[in-house]
Image (cartoon, rainbow, N blue to C red):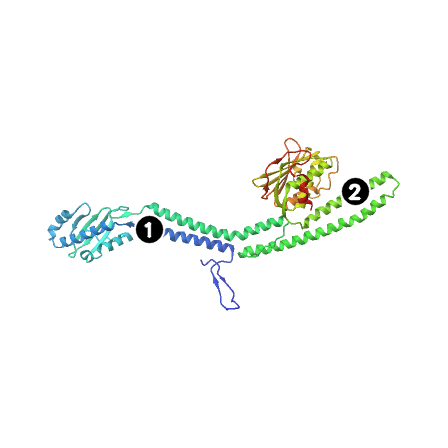
Amino acid sequence: MSGLPVTVAPPSSAAGTRRITLWPRGLVGRVTFVLLAAVALVFLGSSAFYEEAETYTVDDAQLDAIGERLAVDVRVLAATPLAQRPILAAMLSTGDLTLDWRPPEAGRPMRPESAALRDLHDRLVASREPLRGSVLNLSPTQIGSSDVRGIVRLADGSRLGFVAPDILQPHHMTRGLASAAILAGAVLLAAAMLVHTLSMPLRALAELADGVGSGRWVPVEEKGPREVRHLARAINAMQDRIRRLIADRTEALAAVSHDLRTPLARLRLRAGFLNDPEAQAAIESDVAEMEAMVGGVLAYLSGETDPETVRSVDLVSILTTLADDAADQGRDVAYEGVTHCLAKVRPLAMKRVFGNLIDNAVNYGGRARVGLSVVPDGLRIRVDDDGPGLPDAELTRVLTPFYRVEGSRSRSTGGLGLGLAIVNREVTREGGRFTLANRPEGGLRAEILLPRAPVQGPGKSPGSGKAQGVGRAGRSAIDR
């Protein structure tokens, strides 16, 4: 135990005393301490159980009978001439106690070799004067046998040997093994619980670090072992640096994008004074494209510092509202899925996500088929289109901000390259997963998996040009 550090608390200002604890400050020291304690407990407990497993039990009535007989036989033989003692010993022998007399020079005294034999010796000589005044040695007839061989040394130096069969009844070894197994299991369980407790700060740090990657800034409490406290301090410092970096970048880009709107507005106004209709239309088209780009950048940057709070909303209401709006504009959009599904999300962010996916499906695939289903690991939202799909190598690249596929899936320019990036970012912030995959029958499938516990109503809504089951009534839950 000398390798374990000893923590000495500084003197208390109130009492001026020093507090010493054997609990190490470091994680390695604490785990080592737990393992050493577990090994020590198992060793000590196993030693006790194995010693118990090797002990014997003795029937009290049988032992009393043997003790009384030995006391009587010792008196009788001590009063008998030496020449007659062998014959008398043979005559006194029975099935329960076999006797033989030995002259003084025969054999060598035996000593009890176990706690069981020593206990048997003490019980035999107790309150029996002939035996208590003699030298009594006991030993088993053979290893593992329940028979006991003994020798009583008489006053004249001769010895009376005896064999008592079945006097020792060994414990069953399974009893000792079961006890040892129970002890080992209890110690391992206690050690596992202690190690689990020691690892709790690490698991909390892992969850918080994952939250940092999803855009959630949560200060880490600096407590636990020394290594964990240092790690928590480093994560907090890293969060501050990342937050400042993102804030500076966002403010700069937002300022530039916002300032571009003023010259664009002047350019649009001046284009109206041109006498050349073709030049005027070209300029207005360029201005509209630039305004769309500025709007896209601002929309993307606004999500970086989105203050929207999480609340319980009906995801079906969002999807059916978007489907109805698209159908009113003459677009082929249909919803099919459950009619009611509550989840705790940021409603405006999810509305933007679903809207981007539906717009992509209609723009590049001609139509959108939207579905929502409840699966064991959460909620699955899918948007299918009938377009040409994407090359496999581009399925993950298109999630990068400002990335556009060369040779767009339609004859349009393909947008600014922020739509799917916004979807991926917002879904990740919700703790979900966003994937793109080519459908075997053709077209692209965009799928979102949200790890939320929904409250689902019964029934399904069949697909149609207008979303059914909720309809426009769902708008009040989203737009207010």
Residue position marked by numbered label 2 in the rendering: 288
Disc marking residue 52: 1
Decide if residue 41 is on the left or right side of residue 389.
left
Give how far across and how far down residue 92 sits, in percent.
Answer: 15, 48
Q: Secondary structure at mark 1?
A: helix
Give how far across and how far down residue 319 sits, in percent.
Answer: 66, 40
Residue for point 59% across, 51% down: 208
Quarter of the image where the N terminus is located: bottom left
Q: Which is more foreground, mark 2 or mark 1?
A: 2
Between 6 and 476, the one nearer to me in the picture: 476
Give how far across and how far down residue 251 sits, in percent.
Answer: 72, 52
Identify residue type, mark 1.
Answer: Glu
| First in sequence: mark 2 vs mark 1 | 1
Q: Secondary structure at mark 2?
A: helix
Identify residue type, mark 2.
Answer: Ala
Do we see residue 421 in this rendering? Answer: no
Query: Is 202 above or below relative to 341?
Result: below
Disc marking residue 63: none
Q: Is disc 2 in contact with disc 1, using a CB cutoff of under 8 Å?
A: no
